[in-house]
């Protein structure tokens, strides 16, 4: 039998390198921000942001990002993916400048939302271009490299962010995006070919509005409840209202002839199972990353740079294992690889329950390596399954769904687990701060960062407050880690029940169309 002709673009590997640079700027930003959270909470060195404002600094980006991914996926298919990628990079660079020079938490949150618009234009077209320039037989390997780039950004981000915070002001962690964007725009213009969907869909304006409003309302209620308590009616009005709007969004998408999210795709197990798996893993992982930064810099007293270095094993595992996962999938099947990766992730998350203020720090980094190795073997097979469920010209849809679920789940992970962290911390620290004057007491109860700020003014009583705050935070961290592990465990059920085993697409074939998949479901 004669070998089949490779249908990929002649410059496909150089193009992949350019797409990796474009992807780096999106992922790099969030990993840098994790290290900067402690500094942003400082009223002298940063903006004096509360824990709720820090959560919004993360989630204003991810929610706008997620809400616009489908629209930009359609716009990329219609207007041209290279053109949209250049536009997204330029907007991301401008918003990074605005973030760097924000004067208060509100301005930072707004600038971060604008960064989300730019990120939403960048992320979906990277996977779409990969699917269009690579032969299906090479696509799994290319996606493995793409996923490894996420690990590279995770590796660079905390160390780079820590180094910048050691020598410059906090805005430098956003300003660093500008030269990366400039290089990315130049290389995209020179190397990446233009591509479009021959029959693009219309933009679903109502669907976009409903998804953004619903997600923001739901997340606002969760964060506000965690910060100030769930006993107030406005919290539940926001949560229930957000869920109602999201329900309206689903009903609208089912009726629309040009949905921003074709919810009927979720009837196909080959598509729905890996999407759900991605969501569960990122819900769990982002919450752990959020409290990990505070644990290292406050409870353990490490500098931002030292904290970044301690996150390196997680990133190193991503870099080592993600590019090799495609070969593992070919040998053992997607289900087996994803199951092993998920079990490693669950073990690592559950083990964080045993971490306390005196645990040898190498154990923290070892658990990070284990979690990174697990996630590196979940994302590539899941992403490949999602992308191969659709024909090439509809790659934007698969990319948008994959990234939207990842971003929404990550935002909800920060919101839900951050709220658990806040609620347990407040309950645990209350006895230790009850005798303090009201303004000081409220600040110390709000967050562990607030307690450290208060302690600077307490003189001899400071060590007692610091010890109480540390113990309360570690206890809250255990609850958040335990919930993370339980959420990730749900993925095990999904993997063994619905995740495909051996690849359903033969090496010499193109992806099945949606009707074909529906027939096999």
Image (cartoon, grey):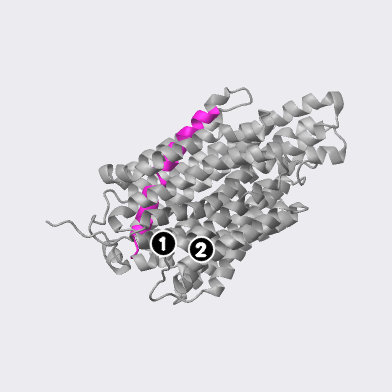
| Label 1: which secondary element | helix
Judge left or right: residue 249 versus residue 199: right
All told, the count of numbered labels is 2
Q: Is residue 370 found inside the magenta-colored segment of the image?
A: yes
Q: Earlier in the sequence, mark 1 or mark 2?
A: 2
Please name the residue that numbered disc 1 is placed on.
Answer: 129
- Report the residue at 35% width, 63% height from top: 390
Please name the residue that numbered disc 2 is placed on.
Answer: 85
Principal secondary structure, stretch drawn in magenta: helix
Q: Where is residue 100 in the image (x, y as percent from the top left)?
A: 70, 52
Q: Is residue 296 found inside the magenta-colored segment of the image?
A: no
Judge left or right: residue 184 versus residue 60: left
Mark 1 burial class by Cα count in 10 Å: few <14, some 14-19, many 20+ = many
| Above or below, 429 relative to 273 | above
The magenta span reads 364-391
> Along the line of sight, which residue is nearer the eye, 59 or 219?
59
- Report the residue at 70% width, 48% height from top: 171
Q: How far apart are marks 1 and 2 (CA)?
A: 10 Å
Q: In which quarter of the image is residue 159?
A: top right
Mark 2 burial class by Cα count in 10 Å: few <14, some 14-19, many 20+ = many
| Above or below, 401 relative to 313 | below
| Label 2: which secondary element | helix
Q: Quadrant of residue 318?
A: top left
Q: Can residue 66 be seen in this view?
A: no
Contact (Cβ within 8 Å) of mark 1 with mark 2: yes
Locate the N terminus and report the quarter of the image it occupies.
bottom left
């Amino acid at each position: 039998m004669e070998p089949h002709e490779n249908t990929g673009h002649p410059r496909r590997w150089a193009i992949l390198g350019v797409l990796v640079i474009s992807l780096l700027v999106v992922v790099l930003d969030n990993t840098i921000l994790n290290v900067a959270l402690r500094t942003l909470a400082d009223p002298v060195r940063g903006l004096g942001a509360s824990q709720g404002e820090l959560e919004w600094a993360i989630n204003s980006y991810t929610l706008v990002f997620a809400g616009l991914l489908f629209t930009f996926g359609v716009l990329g298919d219609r207007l041209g993916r290279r053109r949209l990628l250049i536009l997204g990079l330029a907007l991301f660079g401008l918003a990074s400048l605005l973030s760097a020079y924000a004067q208060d938490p509100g301005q930072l949150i707004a600038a971060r939302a604008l960064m989300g618009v730019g990120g939403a234009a960048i992320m979906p077209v990277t996977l779409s271009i990969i699917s269009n320039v690579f032969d299906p037989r090479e696509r799994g390997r290319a996606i493995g490299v793409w996923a490894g780039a996420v690990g590279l950004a995770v590796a660079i981000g905390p160390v780079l962010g820590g180094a910048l915070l050691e020598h410059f002001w906090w805005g430098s962690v956003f300003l660093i995006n500008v030269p990366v964007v400039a290089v990315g725009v130049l290389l995209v213009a020179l190397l990446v070919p233009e591509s479009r969907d021959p029959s693009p869909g219309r933009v679903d304006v109502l669907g976009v509005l409903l998804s953004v409003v619903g997600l923001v309302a739901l997340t606002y209620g969760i964060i506000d409840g965690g910060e100030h308590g769930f006993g107030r009616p406005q919290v539940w009005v926001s949560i229930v209202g957000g869920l109602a709007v999201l329900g309206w969004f689903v009903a609208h998408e089912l009726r629309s002839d040009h949905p921003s999210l074709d919810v009927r795709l979720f009837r196909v197990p080959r598509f729905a199972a890996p999407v759900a798996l991605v969501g569960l893993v990122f819900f769990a992982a982002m919450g752990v990353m959020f409290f990990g930064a505070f644990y290292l810099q406050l409870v353990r007293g490490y500098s931002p740079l030292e904290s970044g270095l301690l996150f390196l094993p997680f990133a190193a595992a991503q870099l080592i294992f993600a590019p090799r996962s495609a070969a593992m999938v070919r040998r053992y099947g997607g289900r087996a690889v994803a199951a092993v990766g998920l079990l490693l992730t669950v073990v690592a998350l559950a083990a964080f329950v045993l971490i306390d203020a005196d645990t040898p720090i190498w154990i923290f980094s070892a658990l990070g390596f284990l979690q990174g190795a697990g996630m590196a073997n979940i994302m590539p097979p899941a992403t490949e399954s999602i992308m191969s469920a659709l024909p090439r010209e509809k790659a934007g849809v698969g990319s948008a769904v994959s990234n939207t679920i990842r971003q929404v789940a990550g935002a909800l992970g920060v919101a839900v687990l951050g709220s658990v962290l806040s609620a347990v911390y407040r309950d645990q620290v209350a006895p230790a701060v009850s005798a303090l004057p009201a303004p000081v007491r409220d600040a110390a109860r709000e967050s562990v960062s607030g307690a450290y700020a208060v302690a600077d003014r307490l003189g001899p009583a400071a060590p007692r407050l610091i010890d109480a705050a540390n113990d309360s935070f570690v206890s809250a961290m255990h609850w958040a880690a335990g919930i993370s592990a339980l959420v990730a465990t749900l993925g095990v059920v999904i993997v063994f029940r619905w995740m495909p085993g051996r690849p359903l697409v033969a090496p010499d074939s193109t992806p099945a169309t949606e009707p074909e998949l529906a027939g096999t479901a």
